[in-house]
């Protein structure tokens, strides 16, 4: 390998001290050095591993979010190829939108780079043995992470554990699902051993992040979708698939898989602490809302509790230096620009749909119910604190308006409804698609996401200052939820309730009293809300085999009308006032951009026709329902 040129990023050619290097992901390879030089120099070896991190991209902070492939969100802007997926028309030769964070070819480029590091670091000639082992541990973690991305979207994939030479045979068959899981877990065990005792900067792989990823991988492996007898009973497509070992376990002891998942999650719980999971009773409403906002900010906002950063076990650290998308200077760093209200000159990208809103509980832990007259008359009243920390709804208080919008809204409230003007007409809310400010970028659902948008009032348009909100690849609470799920499946309900209540107390909800199937349902809803917009719902709905009734139920939205009460005068400028207006809330179906449906082939993404052409051993082995076309 001495004659192979290795790419090195600019940042580390300057050789910054490792403990101060917060921008290690921001490496843009601009040069090459011979491999024998790379592996004889500690900082250059470190630079190579940093470049492997770069394949993580923006994490989930992309303009088009995975949430729009679930019953969390609708993507506002047409023509992005999202409907191809949500309408079940994706094929091997006609792919829907695919993020580079899990796209087949990009992941194998990342795996190749990790393989180069894993092959060379054990024989690297620089003297710092501790650094050598640390970098090797990081490379094992990253290889495991990229393989886990492939496996959870595609099922079993070709396992490549070396960097191919110029004249070698590159064709390789898909490995079984079980072999892929074993391979990933082995890499994570290696990473955890090599990183044991190492203090890692935010965004770097650590022993705890390796344990957390192992917890996720084993939980998924134990789930219904990957137990072929269970999945086959639910889906005739899976039952008739000729290569079932590529997508799950065709035999074996499922209880032992749940036990492995529980043990892996418990290892994380024992090694970490999380954020405010030691409460003996539900937090107050104000404290609970602040807790969840702080978790969403991950220590990245001056108006949130910095201690919440302890929750993050592996994160994408965003900086104003990292900009790779079409020379767009701000890039998806500005989650608020992409997703905030158009009355703040934002773009309403991934707006919450009614199904998500309805799943937020009442403050007392009861379910929200449109058939309850009190609920339907005031659907945004007395909801649990996470709702107010996650969703912007009509009348929600928000940040000061940009100067040109102040004449339309002097009290800083979201306006997504239509209001009686007192003269037989309607005032269009400033955050609707009929806004007098901008009408191309308003929400079609009449909601906006608040989670992950910095609430700092000095960041008015979400454009005036860089938001250093980290993307949570892995966080402690996910491991808690993993532990709860495995405990429920193993029949240990007492342990499950103990840990589930820790999460509920933090967000102001009462203790769980349910048992059996009802307890599992409470847990699943708790996971849905706690991890909303964090790229979990897509996978959870599939592995639980409930996707036909989640994505498959279409898109519902809210329509808000305000009618003047008798003898009242329309407010100018308008603001939400229940003493002046009667408000009605009507749930409607929406098919503006897509008509959602469910097809069982959507449990997995297809192997692209181009990939099959490149690797003939993939031919005949595409995922259920796709064929090779």
Image: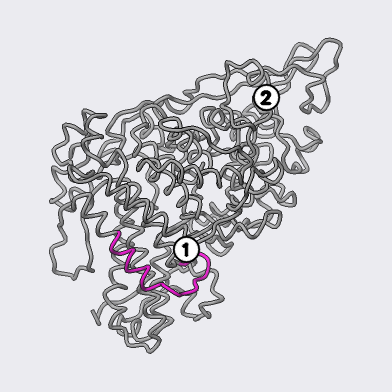
Horizontal and vertical percent position of residue 336: 61, 46
Q: Name the residue under label 1.
A: 271
**Any magenta on residue 35?**
no
- Identify the residue at image location x=70%, y=34%: 396
Residue at 70% x, 27% y is 429
Q: Distance between the residues labelled 2 and 1?
A: 48 Å
Q: Is mark 1 on a helix, strand or loop?
A: helix
Residue 395: image location, x then y, percent: 71, 30
Q: What element carries label 2?
A: loop
Label total for image: 2
Q: Is residue 253 left or right of residue 527?
A: left
> In the rendered image of this protein, does residue 432 appear above or below residue 15?
above
Q: In the rendered structure, does residue 192 fall within the stretch colored magenta?
A: yes
Question: What stretch of residues is rendered in magenta?
Answer: 185-204
In the picture, the disc for residue 417 is 2
User: Of residues 357 and 254, which is closer to you in this image?
Assistant: 254
Name which residue lies at 80% across and 14% down.
422
On the image, the x and y values in percent for residue 561 come to: 68, 18
Q: Is residue 213 above or below residue 27?
A: above
Considering only order in the chain, which callout, 1 or 2, is on the residue closer to the N terminus? 1
Position of 172 with respect to 527 (left or right) is left
- Residue 80: x and y in percent read 43, 38
Quarter holding the C terminus?
top left
Left or right relative to 20: residue 57: left
Q: Which mark is residue 426?
A: none
Q: Nearer the viewer, residue 219 or 552?
A: 219
Q: Which of marks 2 and 1 is in front?
A: 1
Circle 1 packing at 10 Å, graded few (<14), some (14-19), many (20+), is few
Q: Answer above or below: position of 109 versus 488.
A: below
Q: Which of 186 and 567 is in front in this view?
A: 186
């Amino acid at each position: 390998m001495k004659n192979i040129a290795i790419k090195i990023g600019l940042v580390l050619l300057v050789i910054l001290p490792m403990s101060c290097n917060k921008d290690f992901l921001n490496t843009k390879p601009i040069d090459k050095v011979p491999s024998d030089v790379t592996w004889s120099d500690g900082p250059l070896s470190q630079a190579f591993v940093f470049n492997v991190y770069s394949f993580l991209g923006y994490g989930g902070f992309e303009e088009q979010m995975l949430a729009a492939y679930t019953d969390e969100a609708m993507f506002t802007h047409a023509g992005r190829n999202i409907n191809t997926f949500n309408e079940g028309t994706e094929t091997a030769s006609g792919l829907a939108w695919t993020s580079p964070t899990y796209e087949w070819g990009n992941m194998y480029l990342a795996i190749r780079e990790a393989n180069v590091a894993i092959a060379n670091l054990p024989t690297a000639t620089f003297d710092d043995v501790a650094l050598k082992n640390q970098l090797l541990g990081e490379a094992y973690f990253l290889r495991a992470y990229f393989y886990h991305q492939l496996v959870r979207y595609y099922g079993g994939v070709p396992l490549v554990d070396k960097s191919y030479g110029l004249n070698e045979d590159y064709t390789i068959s898909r490995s079984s699902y079980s072999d892929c899981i074993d391979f990933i877990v082995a890499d994570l065990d290696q990473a955890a051993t090599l990183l044991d005792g190492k203090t890692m900067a935010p965004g770097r792989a650590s022993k705890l992040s390796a344990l957390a990823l192992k917890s996720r991988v084993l939980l998924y492996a134990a789930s219904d979708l990957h137990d072929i007898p269970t999945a086959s009973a639910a889906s005739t497509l899976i039952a008739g698939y000729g290569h079932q070992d590529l997508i799950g376990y065709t035999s074996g002891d499922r209880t032992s898989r749940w036990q492995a998942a529980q043990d892996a999650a418990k290892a994380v719980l024992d090694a970490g602490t999380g954020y405010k999971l030691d409460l003996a009773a539900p937090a107050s409403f104000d404290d609970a809302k602040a807790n969840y906002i702080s978790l969403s900010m991950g220590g990245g906002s001056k108006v949130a509790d910095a201690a919440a950063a302890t929750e993050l076990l592996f994160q994408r650290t965003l900086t104003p230096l990292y900009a790779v998308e079409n020379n767009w200077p701000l890039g998806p760093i500005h989650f608020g620009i992409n997703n905030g209200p158009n009355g703040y000159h934002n773009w309403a990208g991934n707006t919450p749909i009614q199904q998500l809103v309805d799943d937020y509980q009442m403050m007392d832990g009861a379910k929200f119910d449109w058939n309850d007259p009190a609920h339907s008359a005031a659907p945004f009243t007395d909801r649990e604190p996470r709702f107010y920390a996650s969703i912007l709804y009509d009348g929600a208080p928000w940040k000061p308006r940009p100067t040109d919008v102040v004449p339309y809204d002097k009290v800083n409230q979201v306006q997504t409804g239509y209001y009686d003007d007192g003269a037989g007409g309607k005032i269009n809310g400033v955050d609707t698609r009929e806004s007098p400010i901008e009408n191309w970028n308003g929400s079609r659902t009449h909601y906006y996401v608040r989670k992950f948008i910095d609430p700092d009032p000095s960041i008015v348009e979400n454009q005036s200052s860089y938001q250093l909100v980290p993307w949570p690849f892995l966080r402690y609470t996910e491991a808690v939820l993993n532990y709860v799920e495995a405990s429920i499946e193993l029949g240990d309900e007492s342990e499950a309730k103990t840990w589930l209540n820790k999460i509920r107390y933090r967000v102001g909800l009462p203790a769980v009293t349910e048992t059996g199937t009802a307890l599992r349902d409470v847990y699943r809803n708790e996971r849905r809300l706690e991890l909303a917009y964090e790229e979990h719902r897509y996978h959870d709905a599939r592995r639980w085999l409930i996707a036909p009734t989640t994505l498959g139920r279409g898109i519902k939205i809210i329509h808000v009308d305000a009618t003047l009460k008798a003898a009242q005068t329309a407010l100018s400028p308008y603001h939400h006032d229940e003493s002046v207006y009667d408000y009605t809330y009507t749930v409607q179906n929406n098919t503006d951009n897509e008509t959602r449906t469910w097809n069982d082939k959507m449990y997995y993404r297809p192997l692209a026709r181009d990939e099959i052409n490149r690797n003939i051993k993939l031919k005949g082995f595409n995922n259920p329902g796709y064929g090779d076309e």
